[in-house]
Image (cartoon, helix red, strand yellow):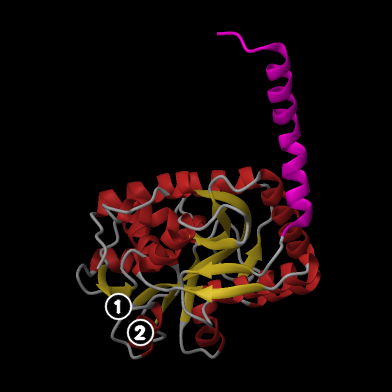
Amino acid sequence: MKLPRRKFLHLAAGAAALPAVSRAWAQAYPTRPVRVIVGGPPGGVADIHARLIGQWLSERLGQPFIIENRPGAGSNIATEMVTHAPADGHTLLLVAINNAINATLYDKLSFNFIRDIAPVASLVTVANVMTVHPSFPVRSVPEFIAYARAHPGTINTGGNPGGAGHLSSELFKMMTGASILYIPYRGEALALTDLLAGQLQVAFATLPGSIEYVRSGHLRVLAVTTAARNKALPDISTIGEFVPGYESSGWQGIGVPRDTPREIIELLNKEINAALADPKIAARIAELGGSALSGSPADFGKLVADETDKWAKVIRAANIKPE
């Protein structure tokens, strides 16, 4: 059935006005305080990065960006909360590598991360470091591989099951054939305590969580897990220098509920990239062992998708289950 000409023109005019309405909404945004949901506890690296960006956005956009910590279930509690929030830009999610891992690690989730969370901007990449107790008789990655092959069943590592450190160690085992036993802990800090006591021999720990132990000489770093050397430890090699193709990075960014207006996403992306270009913020990120990672929403979306595929293969090959 054809529409009457007057009715058709009325509908067309309304449709044409939608982008203008959307732009006006974005120009008014934010109209009230914005919540930034973090799936980890206060004081963690993700929390610190969220507060850095939140303070910047508060100053630039004229409304408080309030950090709200919702730890638990490997960040799934926080993620689920944001998927159910109104898609108006007033609830943001601190996205992390856990979100890419959890898509395969957990059999039943009430959400599909890639479908239900729209990418806004990447923030940082964070290195893990392959660290050993100073008494452990190796000083390089090749020496470690040789020792692990010659002494099967004698090397223990540990950390948060299904976390970035765990998967970093599993990827290392898959690519080198090294014999390493993984012991689950309720958090990285507890694993580092046992590494310091000599009860573990190696840990693939976050650089921010272990760097003070390294600087004090209580732990020895064999290599960083990232593709490039880290500015905080410029003389330390990468694992990839000895194991071609090895790369494992923690990363964080910002996401919003799907259907959030494109103009709001673009505004947030613009302001976050401006923050990452600020020398003071970049320096603070570097102090924490990270590197600023700017880019478009599409760039961040590709990172999440690529990482989801990459870690799915490791999880399935190693038959990793959540604890």
Q: What is the three-letter code of the residue carrying label 2?
A: Leu
Q: Looking at the rendered structure, which numbered label has been put on residue 85?
A: none
Q: Where residue 290 sits: x, y (%)?
A: 61, 68
Foreground of the two, 292 or 268? 268
Q: Where residue 323 sits: x, y (%)?
A: 24, 68
State which tag comes first along the sequence, 2 or 1: 1
Q: Is residue 12 magenta?
A: yes
Q: Is residue 191 left or right of residue 214?
A: left
Q: Where residue 277 sits: x, y (%)?
A: 78, 62
Identify the residue under disc 2.
Answer: 190
Residue 170: which quarter of the image? bottom left
Asked if one can make out residue 232 in the rendered structure from this viewpoint, the answer is no
Dot 1: what SS? loop
Main SS of the magenta part reads helix
Q: Is residue 321 left or right of residue 275?
A: left
The answer to whether residue 234 is above or below residue 4 is below
Dot 2: what SS? helix
Q: Residues within 10 Å of mark 1 (few under 14, many from 20)?
A: some
Q: Quadrant of the N terminus?
A: top right
Residue contact between numbered discs 2 and 1, judged by CB atoms under 8 Å: yes
Identify the residue under disc 1.
Answer: 185
Q: Is residue 79 left or right of residue 229?
A: left
Spatial CA distance of label 2 from label 1 is 6 Å
Residue at 35% x, 81% y is 191
Residue at 60% x, 77% y is 48
Q: What is the three-letter code of the residue carrying label 1?
A: Tyr
Magenta range: 1-29
Foreground of the two, 142 or 73? 73
Q: Where residue 80 sits: x, y (%)?
A: 41, 59
Q: Is residue 300 left or right of residue 199?
A: right
Residue 7: which quarter of the image? top right
Residue at 71% x, 30% y is 14
